[in-house]
Image (cartoon, rainbow, N blue to C red):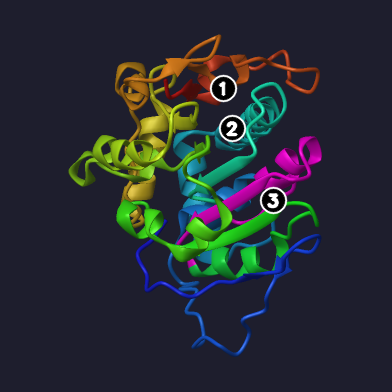
Amino acid sequence: MTSGEPHESGVEGSGSTTWWRSLAGEHSPIDLKTDQPHSARMYDYYLGGKDNFPADREAAEQALAGFPNARVASHANRAFMVRTTRHLAGEAGIRQFLDIGTGIPTSPNLHEVAQDVAPDARVVYADNDPIVLTHARALLTSTPQGTTAYLDVDLRDPESILAAPELRAALDLTRPVALSLIAIMHFIPDADDPHGLLRRLLQELPSGSYLTLTHATADHDEGMERLAAAYRAGGIPAQQRTRTEVARFFDGLELLDPGLQIVHRWRPDGETPTDLTDAQVSFYGAVGRKP
């Protein structure tokens, strides 16, 4: 996520119809800063996407030199998002999701997974990268029964997220919400108080809400620190954390079994590769419930 001025985004519809309203022509031209690497576009490159530019690919290749398994880790991280969202929409019965640090849409997106289980699920995406904004408006469309909205906001300003009219229109914060922070907190350095930012968001959510979070670690492969260093060299804040440090994000929450794990070990399904190692994946992940 990067800093930027907020843009209005809109969701129209009522009853049986919900869709994205095109805002083309309502905004000044978006500067994608294609000459500078960006974490969302680098992640897109790891996943085999096409929404990246030479600066992103060059930076990603430098990161891969330090941690060659970045592609493997990215795919395992995304598969974790799919499994956890499916569980929350299914077994846990959650119908409201807030996904912060959305990234460039790559199917299946969170709302596709949730609404496949529960067509009436309501999903709010939040990011503030201009290329994410552009793609989200075009691609993140809801089922007729549900809602999909987009916030152009910064995780480092939780008040702007909580006060956003689009959030309040889409979600009922008196009912449980699943907060999703997938591969985003390692871009928030300690100086920005990531734990404090998260506590503020959780404070606003009622009992029975959930936190799903993944985070890069060098506990099993020092290459992840070299990857983080490559990001920092490209002007992107990045900080891998230990298991103890990641566990702090879940303070006060009840962890779902099997607790905090390297992501491919969290309730693997038939699509989870059986030959992955902790060193290859190097992402911690867990789901916690607010009591």
Is 232 positioned to the left or the right of 53 in the image? Answer: left
| Residue 279 against residue 70 in the figure, above or below | above
Magenta region: which residues? Answer: 104-129
Reading the image, the residue beneath label 2 is 77
Instruction: Please state which amino acid type lies under the numbered disc 3.
Output: Thr
Query: Residue 68's x, y, as percent?
Result: 54, 34
Tell whether label 2 touches label 1 (CB within 8 Å). yes
Is 46 positioned to the left or the right of 185 in the image? Answer: right
Residue 263: which numbered mark, if any?
1
Residue 38: which numbered mark, if any?
none
Reading the image, the residue beneath label 3 is 106
| Residue 241 against residue 27 in the figure, above or below | above
Query: Residue 62's x, y, as percent?
Result: 46, 47
Mark 1 or mark 3, earlier in chain: 3
Q: Is residue 189 visible?
A: yes
Quarter of the image holding residue 248? top left
Mark 1 or mark 2, earlier in chain: 2
Instruction: Please state which amino acid type lies under the numbered disc 2.
Output: Asn
Give the class, few, some or many, for how many residues have Cα within 10 Å of label 3's Cα (few <14, many ≥20): some
Mark 2 or mark 3, earlier in chain: 2
Secondary element at image label 3: loop
Give the class, few, some or many, for how many residues have Cα within 10 Å of label 2's Cα (few <14, many ≥20): many
Q: Residue at x 24, y 38 (%)?
A: 196
Query: Residue 34's x, y, as percent?
Result: 50, 72
Q: Residue at x 36, y 18 (%)?
A: 243
Pick the quarter of the image with the N terminus: bottom left
**Marks 1 and 3, how far apart in space?**
19 Å
